[in-house]
Structure formats: C-alpha cells, structure tokens
Image (cartoon, helix red, strand yellow):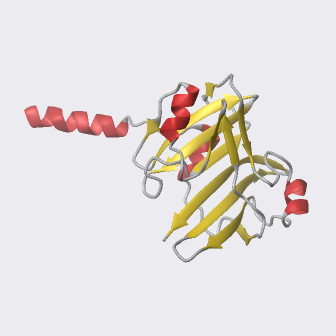
Amino acid sequence: MKYSLVFLCLVAGTCGANQMKGFGARYYDDITETYSDNHATNRDLEPIITVGNEKYKFEVNTVESIAKQAGVDVNKDSQASWICLKSKDINYWFISDNEMGGGYLTTVAMAKDASPCTSYQGFLRVAVKAPMLASKDDISSYFVMPKKDIVMFYKEVESLNYIQSNSIMYYLRGKEVQGLFISQVTTT
C-alpha cells in the first residue's frame, strides 16, 4: 500500500506538469522538412530582447532571470522551461530547451492569440531585422515567397570552436502570420 501511494504521487506529479498553452504549445511540434519550407539566409536573425529596463540574449541569460524581472514563476515540464507574458495584445513565450538550453534562453515565441499569459505592464520588446507578426507578402518581400504554411529562415555562423544557428519560423494562416518562433542553437 505504501508503494502504491508513492507511485501514485509520482505519476500524478508527472501527469500534472504544466504544459505550454495556445500558440506557444507549437514548440512541442515535431517539424520536419516535410511540413516546413526551410531557407538559408544571410540576414541577421539575432533578436534584441528587452523586458523592463534589462536587455537579454539567447544562451547568455536564463529564463529565470527574465521571470524574476517580470515577477512571475517559471513553468517547467520534461521538454522545456518557460514563461508567458502578454503585452499590448501580443503573447510572448520565453523558452529554454531542457536538452540544449539548460535554463538559458533559447527561443522566443510570439502570437496574437487568447492564451492565458500573465499580463506584463512594463516595457517589453522583441525585435529582429525581419518582419514579425505581419503578412505573407511582407515575408516574401523581405526573404522569399513561402511555399507552405510553416516557413523557416536560418543563418549559420561558423567559427573554429562552434556553429551558431539563428532562425525565425513563421506559422501562416492564409495571408497573415499567426505566430512565430525565434531561436538560437550553438553546437561545438
């Protein structure tokens, strides 16, 4: 009986783990080239991230540091740690991949949807030198015309010690961008 109670607690804790909701939950999608339209680019895709009066960088700052600045708790599950903030009708998911990120910021998702994100009244801005929550035409005039409803543009920078890849992945609905993910991965 004692072991059954321990097992039940472990299962309930695992099953009850908080998962991302709304557009941010697409982070868990297994996107392959079959589903997405992928293009290399020479455009700079490294974002400028500002929350409050602090600037944050991928793979340098933690999701925990952003959560502390925003006054929210970090959500965690088996695949990621994240927070979701809503500012000026846009939801922002700040995500750390558990396998590669180790708590450090690796992805920002953005969407205008009805996700239950925490309202943030301070200054919040994520900027990259590319169209954001815009139209398919804006994307095609900046990059190339998307051929599928999911399109990713990426830039790889190689050095002697590592390869760093920055990407922006758009999810299109008709002629509009439903949401996007901006990510960075560095490998040695």
x and y, in percent, of residue 92 in the image: 65, 38
Residue at the image point whose x is 30% and y is 34% from the top: 12
User: Which residue appears at 73% of the width and 55% of the height?
Assistant: 170
Q: Is residue 103 visible?
A: yes
Query: Left or right: where does residue 112 sit relative to residue 67?
Result: right
Q: From the viewer's perspective, is 49 left or right of 17?
A: right
Rendered-image quadrant of the N terminus: top left
Q: Residue 119 in the image: x percent, y percent?
A: 64, 24
Above or below: residue 184 compared with residue 62:
below
- Disc tally is 0
- Taking depth in this image into account, of 48 and 106 the one nearest to the observer is 48
Q: Is residue 63 left or right of residue 114?
A: left
Residue 1 in view:
no
Residue 65 placement (x, y as % from top left): 51, 36
Of residues 74 and 57, the one nearer the viewer is 57
Q: Work out which residue is located at the far bottom of the displayed protein and give it.
A: 160
Quarter-of-image position of residue 51: top right
Tell me which corner region of the image, top left, top right, bottom left or bottom right, holds residue 140: bottom right
Q: Is residue 87 above or below residue 108?
A: above
- The residue drawn where x is 33% and y is 40% is 14
Q: Nearer the viewer, residue 141 or 149?
A: 141
Up the image or down, 144 lies above or below 109; here it is below
Q: Residue 91, position in %: x, y? A: 68, 35
- Point 81% across, 64% down: residue: 146
Residue 7 falls left or right of residue 91: left
